[in-house]
Amino acid sequence: MHSLTRITAAFVIAFSTVGAIAQTTAPVVAIATQPYNLEADVTRVMKTFDVPGIAIAVVKDGKVVATRGFGVRKLGEAATVDAKTLFEVASNSKAFTAAALAMLVDEGKLAWDDPVTKHLPDFQMYDAYVTHEMTVRDLLTHRSGLGLGAGDLLWWPTTNFSTDEIIEKLRYIKPATSFRSAYAYDNLLYIVAGKIIAAKSGKSWGDTVREKILAPVGMTGTTTSLAEGSANANQSGAHSKIKDKIALVKSMPVANAVGAVGINTNAEDIAKWMQVLLDNGKIASKGTDANGKPVRLYSDARATELWTAQTPIKINEPPAALAATKPNFSAYGLGFQLRDYHGQKVAMHGGALQGFYSRVMLVPESKLGIAIFTNAESGGALSALQYRLLDQYMSVTPGIAPSDWIGIIGAQDKAMHDKELARIKANKTTRAAASKPSLALADYDGEYQDAWYGKAVIRHVGKKQTLTFTRTPDLTGELEHFQHDTFIVRWKERNFNADAYVTFALNPDGSIERMRMAPVSTETDFSYDFQDLNFVPVGAASKP
């Protein structure tokens, strides 16, 4: 999906479930004269954070230091992760979309500050002023005024909306802030950016990225859709927690959101991509062209723009144990989050889709690139490896000893999850358990319409009352009464970990005025943006 903005809680399982370790390099990697056992750290992370499989890529000073796989592709199977195992990398796709736009800028086919309507005349936001002023640059910088993850339910979990339908529905999503006044991560505008790439290149986003980026860089194993790689047996399975136990789940196709989350890749290919990014778009393996100039994807000017701060990001005070991770600056560029660590600039991004989390980090001053792919939903695993590997591979002042980030973040992760479980338990015990709904249960049945999502249906199936999102096949669940006119929907796909409160407001005559929703847990991924929905009974709905 998107950039990771929270640490997902997860803790220890028996090491025997982690599985075998596949290698494509020697067990001990060395930078200068300092030996480093990468395998030991990754194995410890898999055990601490309950992750079945991890792939790592490290490039340093223009060379590939490591492309390795650890653990298993799927729980219960023997096949191991290796350097060619495909992972869904979700929002790490945004860098490819930004690079493709940069190439179009170099070709003179568009400019960063062109109005979006110049290239997509039918584009429309909720506010007419924003529609008129929104530029190509604005699509990439998370400052549109949309709220965090606004509209993500149009594509997450897998929906049957088309890309064009998603873009059309932007006009019905109310802003959370004024235009360009605040940072709030979104995915929908990267879907728009992907549409512009297709419009200007005359080919789909996938075909354009494949021809203009993947093929020249030599990323032969990378795909732009799950369907494209369906014949490849060397793919990681997706894993999620169900009642705090890791389980194999189905992957999440996102064909309608490719500009934001479409790339599937492996350690070997991402190493090549990081080499190009660290070399300002040059493809060193291609040498020079007929004019003696380096073969490159995009110019130095575009490379600078990608990693130039566009939108400031608020810096929060971390827990005392994580004080060393606090940056001096934080911002979003074009397809990259920017911050500093040990006084050096880091261009990075995270990615999250059902069953997969990933992170890519570039440290230009150290000529360092690190990629981490996991087949589980643990932000803690990513963060622990992020700081451990940065400490190991960055060129920093001698004498800075690496912290035990795996132990520190593991403890923080567990404490946060325990606190959230306690909060949910407290909500259960303090609710008005003796209260009853205002209406007979059958009176809540019916169709409800939201301006941007569309319809949801409540109906009785036998003795059970269910809520179904009509355009999202897997978003169906059973309603149970919580208190007063609030219910909880328990989704049939338990790995979603996204149960939600469903609250009804009544008119003076006792009829239902509206239905609102909110996640039960603060750990629910923000792309379940239930809180932005405003359902009204279809008979009472006015046209948007």
Image (cartoon, rainbow, N blue to C red):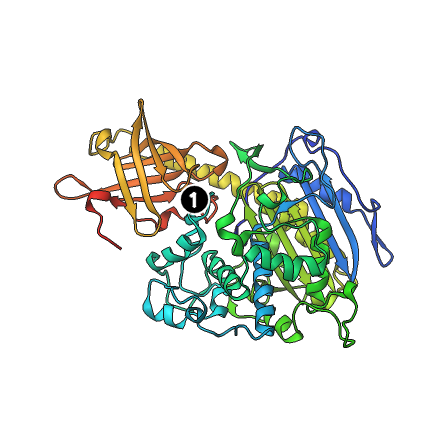
Outermost top residue: 462
Q: Is residue 19 above or below residue 213?
A: above
Residue type at tag 1: Asn
Q: Position of residue 353 (x, y in %)?
A: 54, 46
Which of 53/520 is in front? 53
Which residue carries the number 1 mark?
160
Quadrant placement of the C terminus: bottom left
At a point 61% along the width and 43% down the height, the residue shown is: 411
Q: Is residue 92 visible?
A: yes
At a point 43% along the width and 50% down the height, the residue shown is: 162
At a point 36% along the width and 55% down the height, the residue shown is: 169
Task: State left or right for residue 311 relative to residue 102.
Answer: left
Q: Is residue 292 above or below residue 85?
A: below
At a point 57% along the width and 69% down the height, the residue shown is: 104
Which of 257/422 is in front? 257
Q: How crowded is the residue under tag 1: few (<14 C-alpha within 10 Å), some, or many (20+)?
A: some
Q: Examine the image and state in which quarter residue 350 appears.
A: bottom right
Q: Position of residue 325 (x, y in %)?
A: 62, 58
Q: Is residue 328 above or below residue 39?
A: below
